[in-house]
Image (spheres, rainbow, N blue to C red):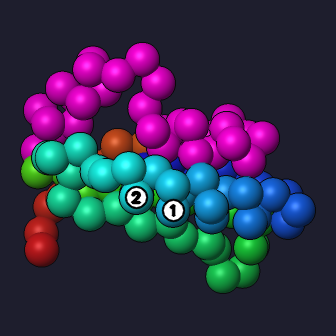
Amino acid sequence: MLEAHVTPENWTILEQAYRNAIERGRPAQMLQSYLIQHVSDPTLWNIVALWSSREALDAYRRSVEIPEGLEVFRAAGVEPALSIFNVVAA
């Protein structure tokens, strides 16, 4: 999960950068991805991606110079924080 505060004037840029990234296609092992905005603090945005495995995520991160999600947030002028979670139950 990537997370950053984005100023309102950059929300449209962030959304378009995310849409552009999705249109280019997700990596094969990425099962789903969402751009989400916090309800109580609308300046707080996240990209949540679900991968087939931790190994798939690690392999993707090794295969690219700059992960696509970082580029999305950087287009909006911010540097996101990265958090990695394990799915415990579904």
From the top left corner, tell me how far across and down residue 15 is, in percent: 63, 64
Q: Quadrant of residue 40?
A: bottom right
User: Observer-nearest residue: 5 or 31?
Assistant: 31
Name the amino acid type tagged 1.
Arg
From the top left corner, tell me how far across and down residue 27 is, in percent: 23, 44
Instruction: Please report contact status of discs 1 and 2: CB closer than 8 Å, yes or no.
Output: yes
For label 2, the residue is: 23
Mark drawn on residue 19: 1
Magenta stretch, residue numbers = 53-82
Q: Would residue 86 be visible to someone looking at this image?
A: no
Identify the element where label 1 is drawn.
helix
Q: Quadrant of residue 22?
A: bottom left
Residue at (51% x, 55% y) in the render: 20
How many residues crowd around disc 2 within 10 Å: few (fewer than 14), some, or many (20 or more)?
A: few
User: Observer-nearest residue: 17 or 70?
Assistant: 17
Alpha carbon distance from label 1 to label 2: 6 Å
From the top left corner, tell me how far across and down residue 14 is, in percent: 67, 57
65 falls in the magenta region? yes
Image quarter where the C terminus lies is bottom left
